[in-house]
Amino acid sequence: MSSFWSIWISIISLGTIMGCFLLLRWCLKNKTGVTEGDDMHHEFDGIVEINNPLPKWWTYLFYACIVWGLAYLALYPGLGNFEGMLGWKSSNQGVLTLEESRAAVAKAKAEGKIVQYDREIAHAKQKYDPIFDEYASRPIPELINDPEALKVGQRLFLQNCSQCHGSDARGQLGFPNLTDNDWLYGGTPEKIKETLLGGRSGQMPSWASFGEQGVKEVVAYTLSLSGREVDAGLKAAGESRFATCSACHGSDGKGNQMLGAPNLTDNIWLYGATEESVTETVMNGRNGVMPSFKDRLGENKVHVVAAYIYSLSHK
């Protein structure tokens, strides 16, 4: 925060408290010209106004609030760039990566600062880590029969995975459906966990070098592999060109899970099933990225998420 805004906020905060104090002092003075306790000669519906001072308890409560406000601003951050006498912070501000976050936590601890978010994380780890340790000690095929474990896995999935795969895990254009048992890299518990821990980076190259006609031929043959009706001439020409593609997708087009190359014969299309979509894929290539969650969640939580994902296609 710049010095200008720091001073501006401090003036507003302290000025408001001072204004409340002056207003209270003004209200405690009798400026009516009528002796306290006497009739003010104001009457409405049988109710007579008496010139009485503010109740003592009310006055003391106002003073207490003013003192509390000043004490709070002295002890905690609130006056611009002033960090407060206690060194308390709600969180480590400005961090952009996990590495920066860990460094900020270590620095705050070394300097004796109280960071509320860090304390809550430490408390959560102390409370919940034993639960995740117990879950991680059980194999995934066994864990999918534990309703409580799956609820935990579902919540972690919604927090970390649903942005791409959807809250129902059915995916969207460019993001795989996790409920249909069609897997790019394998759907075993071990492979799902491997994907979550290490992430995936798809490398479908561009085949613009085929030329526009060549791409049409390859697309025609590719679509024919899943039973689609295509031009016979284009299909025949595309079959010979497909030899280049078979290095990843196999000579039969059924893919290779070791490489993450999709099966082209099952009519399941990650980036769209239309001729235009497939043409775009062949012409421009695809480079989908699945991030790693090893550092973000840790292996034990990944184990529970993997169990939840595995359960979606193994009801």
Image: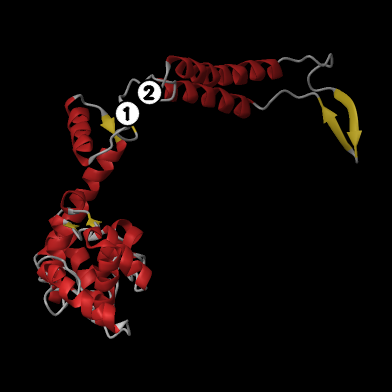
- Taking depth in this image into account, of 23 and 88 the one nearest to the observer is 88
Q: Residues within 10 Å of mark 2 (few under 14, many from 20)?
A: some
- Type of amino acid at the residue the image marks with label 2: Leu
Q: Is residue 44 above or below residue 310?
A: above
Q: Secondary structure at mark 2?
A: helix
- Which color scheme does this rendered protein use? secondary structure
Q: Residues within 10 Å of mark 1 (few under 14, many from 20)?
A: some
Residue 194 showing in the rendered view: yes
Residue holding disc 1: 88
- Taking depth in this image into account, of 213 and 207 the one nearest to the observer is 213
| Dot placed on the residue nearer the N-terminal end, 1 or 2 | 2
**Are discs 1 and 2 less than 8 Å apart at CB?**
yes
Mark 1 or 2: the one toward you: 1
Task: Pinpoint residue 101: horizontal percent, then vertical percent.
Answer: 23, 37
Residue holding disc 2: 75
Residue at 84% from the left image edge and 13% from the top image edge: 33
Task: Pinpoint residue 21: horizontal percent, then vertical percent.
Answer: 60, 18
